[in-house]
Amino acid sequence: MGKNYKAIIFLILFTLLLTACSKGSTSGNQLNGGSSGSDTSSGTKADMKYSSSTGIASDTGTEQLADETAGKESVSTNRKLIRRIIMELETMEFNPTMDFITKEVNKSGGYIEKSEIQGDSYEGSTNRYANLVIRIPSTEVDSFITKVDKNANVINKQESMEDITLNYVDTKSHVKALQIEQERLLALLEKSGKLEDIISLEDRLSDVRYELEKYASTLRTYDNLVEYSTITLTVDEVVRITPVEGKSAWNRMGTGLKDSLYNIRQGFVNFIVWLVVNGPYLILWGIILVIFVLIGIKINKKYKKTLQKPIPTAVVLQDSAQEKESDKS
């Protein structure tokens, strides 16, 4: 009886052990297979969305993941950079410098977007200057700047870089989404038979086309700004190139003294030039002034002569008699 009791207990424990092992393997299968199946089904249901405007179910989750992946690859491999450069130049030979700049712009494959030239070299004061907005292919910018730097005195240079990669990718994603919606709207428009549905679909289609044109224009602008860098050039005609000033006090004093002497000399030269240029006017006004002076002198002489003439005796006696009669009365 004791042995039978022990055998029964052993069988019960063995059975429980087998049951536990079978449950563990079943739960493991569920974790590895069953749960992924349920997640996949739920994920598919979550990703599948219905578009109320198009009436077609779309796998938006997959599309969004693909767009994000493409966007990340684009950001990392093809950055969109807008380069802008501002330069101020001095030259003693204005026309040759302008011809050189125009020649180099054409040689680099760029173009002059804006050109403005003002001033002249009248009276020896060379104050002509030009303001140019130039578009140069981004691959040729450094070469163009180097050539300009060698042929003119650059007194100021500023450069900036703007990264529009994220904006570009975002705009491109909008265009792709709108193109897909446009195709679906056209497909629905062919199948629809109700007048109300046709009107609604055409209204939405016109909005989509307008947005597509707007985003396409933005992309074209971005592409142009990225492919062609913008260089703003200011060219000043001078008679003396601005020297590079040293940092020491002696260099600064020497430069200041040279500038002062140069300004004095230029002031004297400008005065001589002004005197020669305006000489005819000065001579004309001098002649007119001399004529008026001579006329004034003649008038003054006549007036003095009239004062110096003697008064007649009869007139004097008559005046004295009148005075006596007035005293008596």
Image (cartoon, rainbow, N blue to C red):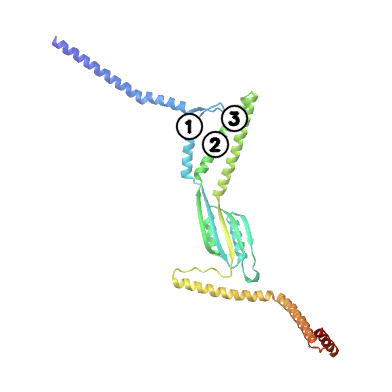
Q: Nearer the viewer, residue 289 or 44?
A: 289
Asked if labels 1 and 2 touch by Cβ distance under 8 angstroms, the answer is no
Label 3 is placed on what type of residue? Leu
Label 1 is placed on what type of residue? Thr
Q: Earlier in the sequence, mark 3 or mark 2?
A: 2
Mark 2 and mark 1: Cα distance apart in space: 14 Å
Query: Which residue does the numbered mark 1 point to in the structure image?
Result: 62
Q: Which label is found at residue 185?
A: 3
Query: Which residue does the numbered mark 2 point to in the structure image?
Result: 176
What residue is at 41 percent from the left and 26 percent from the top? 39
Determine the residue located farthest toward the right in the rendered image. Answer: 314
Q: Measured from the top left, where is residue 128 in percent x and y?
A: 62, 65
Label 2 is placed on what type of residue? Lys
Quarter of the image where one finds residue 9: top left
Q: Nearer the viewer, residue 279 or 25?
A: 279
Within 10 angstroms of label 1, few (less than 14), some, or many (20 or more) residues? Answer: few
Determine the residue located farthest toward the top in the rendered image. Answer: 1
Quarter of the image where one finds residue 93: bottom right
Q: Secondary structure at mark 3?
A: helix
Q: Measured from the top left, where is residue 245 in percent x and y?
A: 48, 68
Asked if labels 2 and 3 touch by Cβ distance under 8 angstroms, the answer is no
Asked if labels 3 and 1 touch by Cβ distance under 8 angstroms, the answer is no
Q: Secondary structure at mark 2?
A: helix
Mark 1 and mark 3: Cα distance apart in space: 21 Å
Mark 3 and mark 2: Cα distance apart in space: 14 Å
Examine the rendered structure and indicate whether residue 142 appears above or below residue 13. Answer: below
Q: Measured from the top left, where is residue 105 in percent x and y?
A: 59, 57
